[in-house]
Image (cartoon, rainbow, N blue to C red):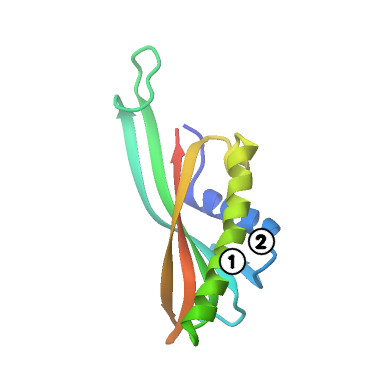
Amino acid sequence: MADIYPADVNTAIADTLSAQVKSVNQVQDLSDLTEGMNAVPAIQVYPEAGDESHNSNTGKRTFNGGVNTRQWVFHIDIYAKQRSNIGIDTQLAVELLGDVMKALDAVQVAGSPHFGLEGIQSWSYRWERVTFEYASNRYSGVRVIVTITIF
């Protein structure tokens, strides 16, 4: 199994978005997360959950050998703007989602190593519209949920 850890993947995702999504004011990696959202539109990237499978015989097998697998979930929170008008707020959030999807789709077609990290065998994402409660304020946005598989 590759020596990849959640902080490595988090930074790789944040760096990818920072380099390609120019429609936001900032992309916050782990050490950049703030107590308030001062410069929207913005993106936050952080790990949310993970599953580890050691000596699994249910995963990929070669000559009857089990493979240790890791499956991690990362959130990409897109803060469009502070809530004021649902139509305008949602329009901006969906436009920003399109920019993030373009950046992620470019990684998808680039091939391995995904996000520049050896060991990531596959990954996928889904998204959902969200009204974020952050530092006593409400923001219109989208949460992109990325699932990474490593073995």
Residue 114 position, x and y percent, is 58, 40
In front of the other: 15 or 77: 77
Image quadrant in which you'd find residue 22: bottom right
Residue 12 vs 97, above or below: the answer is above
Tell me if 100 is positioned left or right of 85 in this view. right
Task: Write down the residue under mark 1.
Answer: 96
User: Which mark sits nearer the N-terminus, 2 or 1?
Assistant: 2
- How crowded pointer 2 is (Cα within 10 Å; few <14, some 14-19, many 20+) is rated as many
Residue 126 position, x and y percent, is 44, 53
Q: CA distance from mark 2 to mark 1?
A: 8 Å
Tell me whether circle 2 and circle 1 mark residues in contact (CB < 8 Å): yes
At x 37%, y 49%, the residue is 50
Tell me if 99 is positioned left or right of 72 in this view. right
At x 61%, y 39%, the residue is 109
Residue 69 position, x and y percent, is 39, 35
Task: Write down the residue under mark 2.
Answer: 21
Mark closer to the observer (2, 1): 1
Q: Amino acid at mark 1?
A: Leu
